[in-house]
Image (spheres, helix red, strand yellow):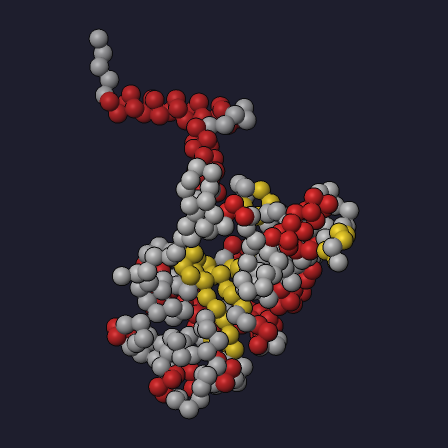
Amino acid sequence: MRIRPASTVTSALVGASLGALAVLSSLGLTTPAALAAEDTAVRASHDPVVIGHRGLPSEAPENTLASIDRASKKGVRWVENDVQRTKDGALIVMHDTTLERTTDAKQRYPRRAPWKVSDFTLAEIEKLDAGSWFDRRFTGERVPTLDRYLRRVDHNRQKLLLEMKAPELYPGIERQIVDGLRRAGWLDQRHVQGGLVVQSFNATSLKTLHHLRPDLKEGFLGCPQGHGAPLLRGLRRPDQPQLREGHPHLGPRRPRAQGTARQAAGDLRVDGGRRRSGGRPGAARRGRHHQQLRARHRRRPGRGLGRPVLPERQRPGHRRADGHRLVRQRPAVPA
């Protein structure tokens, strides 16, 4: 019996395996490695996307560079921000349309209430402390400009969900945002295809942005059946799926009830004791019931307005057939 070294046997098996894989590939059959890669891709497509809303606001002041840095350390690959415009036309990252909640604007500029973002220049906003309100460790954190924010997101190898905050307050901000993205290098193929989404509650602003850059991915915040529905027509590209309102597992939402209660009841009215119906099935029955309610709740002199008229056998003080006397129930007096 001849004993071969283990290395020789292993080499032979590996060579045979490689040869078998080569034969499978040449025949057009799927190899185990290809099956594993396909399974990984399928599982990855169903994984949830985690987005850091305003960065990581539970550990750092929102919409600051420190917040997205904390998100990056936690492995959050997508971050969301809000973009607004200063008095002198600079784009900054700020959620509220006023400055007093997340900065010390109220203490630094006490006579400039209500401290709107659009009432301050960039130089004035850069003097504000945007971190001490959250924790003393972040004292000196500044409100970032959009340009600095984009470069930091790129440095962290993150992706961005950019919201145009209250664009109706800043006419022309859509073109400014596009220019800012271009200057920071965010309109290349890598960012546009898989690293950038622009969203807003304002459908008109989204349509303006779509005309400027049709290749950008837009997101409408709100109900598509609301005031923005007519403005959103034509925004969907042929390669995008149709947006359907409602829960994906519960189906589309039922239509809302329109009109008044009188219209829902078949335009039913009672005029002078005569019933008029709009012809809807059951309207006559509802009319009779309505007349009975009016009769039971008619006015009685000395007894108040709108009190129900009880039959004689149900009035307090009436003796029933079994000899028991009905007694009016009074509410209990608290101790």
Image position, residue 234 (x, y; %): 70, 57
Q: Is residue 265 visible?
A: yes
Query: What residue sits 48% from the left and 85% below the top?
Result: 121
Image position, residue 300 (x, y; %): 59, 61
Q: Quadrant of residue 75 in the image?
A: bottom left
Q: Which residue is nearer to you in this view: 121 or 233? A: 233
Q: Which residue is nearer to you in this view: 252 or 96? A: 252
Q: Which residue is nearer to you in this view: 195 or 190? A: 195
Image position, residue 134 (x, y; %): 31, 72
Residue 61 lies, with reference to residue 104, above or below; the image says: above
Residue 61 lies, with reference to residue 267, above or below; the image says: below
**Number of labelled discs?**
0
Q: Is residue 142 visible?
A: no
Query: Residue 81 vs residue 261: left or right?
Result: left
Query: What residue sits 67% from the left and 58% below the top?
Result: 260
> The C terminus is located in which quarter?
bottom left
Residue 291 lies, with reference to residue 11, above or below; the image says: below
Image position, residue 259 (x, y; %): 68, 57
Query: What residue sits 75% from the left and 58% below the top?
Result: 272
> The N terminus is located in which quarter?
top left
Query: Residue 155 vs residue 189: left or right?
Result: left
Query: Residue 131 vs residue 26: left or right?
Result: left
Q: Which residue is nearer to you in this view: 98 or 274? A: 274
Residue 180 lies, with reference to residue 38, above or below; the image says: below
Query: What residue sits 62% from the left and 58% below the top?
Result: 298
Q: Residue furthest bottom?
A: 111
